[in-house]
């Protein structure tokens, strides 16, 4: 059965997933890139090195954001949202940084996830994590690999050195429209 997600289901997917894709567009060229993110109910927050994605979003701040949860080919949920890119500075940068730290700290071995920091729906190798089967031994929770990067200590004006000699950028995408679909077999 195919269908549309309701508002509560859309919010659930955005809150639970950890990897989404930003779609940006300039000069008749579209660029889609996966990002780790945190969501506060209104905006998606991220951290990035300066590069093509940031350059394109600066030139055209109207972006698309996509996230999915795939159990198998017949059972999935996807959300597509549109919004506006903003670079964060000052107290906004500090708040965004803290949101990202709170979201990913449990995955760095610092404790159990909070209710807002759910286990990712895809493992580090990209395969779907499955719900436990009654009576089966619990599956080990994979340790995330690439999530360890990118949430450094505070630095003035929302930009931190990223080790490559270029400034990193804290940003948010204020979501203005959201839609979602699902398939259940």
Image: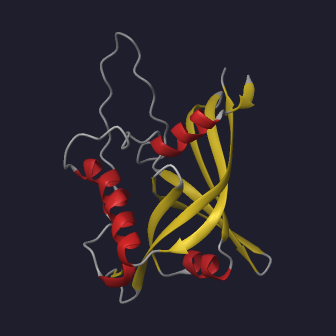
Q: Is residue 65 left or right of residue 37?
A: right
Whether 136 is drawn above or below 88: the answer is: above
* Residue 173: quarter of image: bottom right
Location of the C terminus (image quadrant): top right
Q: Residue at x 33, y 50 (%)?
A: 144
Q: Residue furthest left?
A: 110
- Image coords of residue 91 (percent x, y): 36, 73
Number of callouts in the render?
0
Location of the N terminus (image quadrant): top right
Q: Nearer the viewer, residue 118 or 97?
A: 97
Whether 74 is drawn above or below 92: the answer is: above
Whether 86 is drawn above or below 66: the answer is: below
* Residue 48: quarter of image: bottom left
Q: Is residue 174 left or right of residue 147?
A: right
Q: Residue at x 66, y 57 (%)?
A: 176
Q: Residue furthest bottom?
A: 165
- Image coords of residue 152 (percent x, y): 28, 71
Q: Nearer the viewer, residue 75 or 62?
A: 62
Q: Is residue 6 left or right of residue 159?
A: right
Q: Residue at x 68, y 77 (%)?
A: 60
- Image coords of residue 179 (percent x, y): 70, 44
């Amino acid at each position: 059965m195919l269908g549309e997600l309701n508002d509560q289901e859309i919010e659930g997917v955005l809150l639970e997933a950890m990897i989404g894709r930003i779609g940006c567009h300039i000069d008749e060229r579209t660029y889609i890139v996966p990002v780790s993110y945190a969501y506060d109910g209104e905006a998606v927050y991220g951290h990035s090195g300066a590069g093509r994605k940031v350059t394109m979003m600066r030139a055209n701040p109207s972006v698309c954001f996509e996230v999915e949860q795939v159990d198998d080919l017949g059972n999935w949920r996807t959300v597509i949202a549109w919004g506006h890119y903003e670079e964060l500075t000052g107290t906004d940068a500090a708040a965004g940084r803290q949101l990202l730290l709170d979201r990913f700290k449990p995955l760095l071995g610092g404790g159990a996830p909070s209710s807002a920091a759910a286990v990712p729906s895809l493992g580090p190798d990209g395969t779907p994590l499955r719900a436990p089967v009654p009576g089966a031994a619990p599956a080990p929770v994979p340790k995330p690999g690439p999530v360890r990067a990118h949430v450094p200590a505070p630095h003035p004006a929302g930009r931190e050195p990223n080790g490559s000699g270029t400034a990193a950028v804290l940003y948010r995408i204020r979501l203005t429209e959201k839609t979602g679909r699902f398939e259940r077999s």
